[in-house]
Structures are given as C-alpha cells and as structure tokens.
Image (spheres, rainbow, N blue to C red):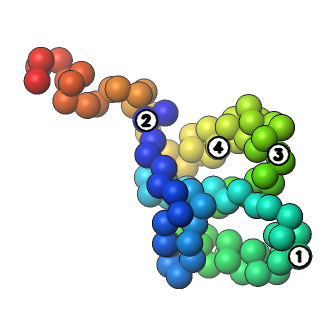
Amino acid sequence: MGLKFKRQKPVVHYIIDFVCFEPKLIIEIDGGQHAEQVAYDHRRDQCLRGEGFAVLRFWNNQLLTETNAVLESIRKMVLTLSPAPLPQAGEGSKANDGNGE
C-alpha cells in the first residue's frame, strides 16, 4: 500500500512496536506478559488515541499462525483511516513520474 512503518519508535512517552505516521497507525505485537498488564495497556492505548493514533494489538502467536488475517486487519484499518486512495507501491516516486527522471 506504499506505507512506511517504523519500528521501536518513541511516540508521546512510549516506545511503539510499529508506527506509520501517515495515516497515524500504531501496531503492537504482544507477548504473554501483556496478559498481566491489561490495565496498563488500556491506559497506554487511550493516551495514544488521544494523540490521534489508531492502535491495533495482536498476540505474538496470532501473528505467527494467522499472518494473513493480521495483515488483512491492518489493511482494513489503513483504508478506514485514509481519506483518499493510497498510491500503490512504486507510484508517485520520481522514477515513475513519467518524466524519465
């Protein structure tokens, strides 16, 4: 979809697993320790949403065993957050601008 995700970046005062600043999407991949810190994760997500980010959380094993479903969830969220169609990979770059530059 032509998006750039950054890994392990600070947002507000948290280190985020993956963030795409356009369209303001955060993806968290949670291990088993998150089962014991549900309240903390909820407060964290609320803070990040308050800054205008959408937050998607997936379990490690979900990512490994249901990869296509996880990717589809991310794709649907991006479409929800994007007011206009996103360029396909390679579109909009100088190499493909039709000017031969």
Task: Please indicate whether residue 50 sits to the left or right of residue 58 in the image.
Answer: left
Q: Is residue 78 visible?
A: yes
Residue assigned mark 4:
74
Q: Position of residue 87 (x, y in %)?
A: 39, 31
As shown in the figure, which amino acid type bears the numbered disc 4? Ile
Which residue occupies the foreground of this view, 38 or 33?
A: 33
Instruction: Please state, as top left, top right, bottom left or bottom right, where the C terminus lies in the image.
Output: top left
Mark 1, secondary structure of its residue: helix
Depth check, mark 4 against mark 1: the one in front is: 1
- CA–CA distance in space, label 4 to label 3: 13 Å
Q: Position of residue 13 (x, y in %)?
A: 53, 82
Q: Earlier in the sequence, mark 2 or mark 1?
A: 2
As shown in the figure, which amino acid type bears the numbered disc 2? Gly
Residue assigned mark 1:
36
Mark 3, secondary structure of its residue: helix
Residue assigned mark 3:
62
As shown in the figure, which amino acid type bears the numbered disc 3? Gln
Q: Position of residue 56 (x, y in %)?
A: 69, 56
The quarter of the picture where residue 3 lies is: top left
Label at residue 28: none
Mark 4, secondary structure of its residue: helix
- CA–CA distance in space, label 4 to label 1: 25 Å
As shown in the figure, which amino acid type bears the numbered disc 1? Glu
Label at residue 2: 2
Quick check: marks 2 and 4 in contact, CB under 8 Å?
A: no
Q: Earlier in the sequence, mark 4 or mark 1?
A: 1
User: What residue do we see at 49% from left, 45% from top?
Assistant: 82
User: What residue do we see at 67% from left, 77% from top?
Assistant: 44
Mark 1: few/some/many CA within 10 Å (<14, 14-19, 20+): few
Q: Earlier in the sequence, mark 4 or mark 3?
A: 3
Q: Position of residue 26 (x, y in %)?
A: 58, 59
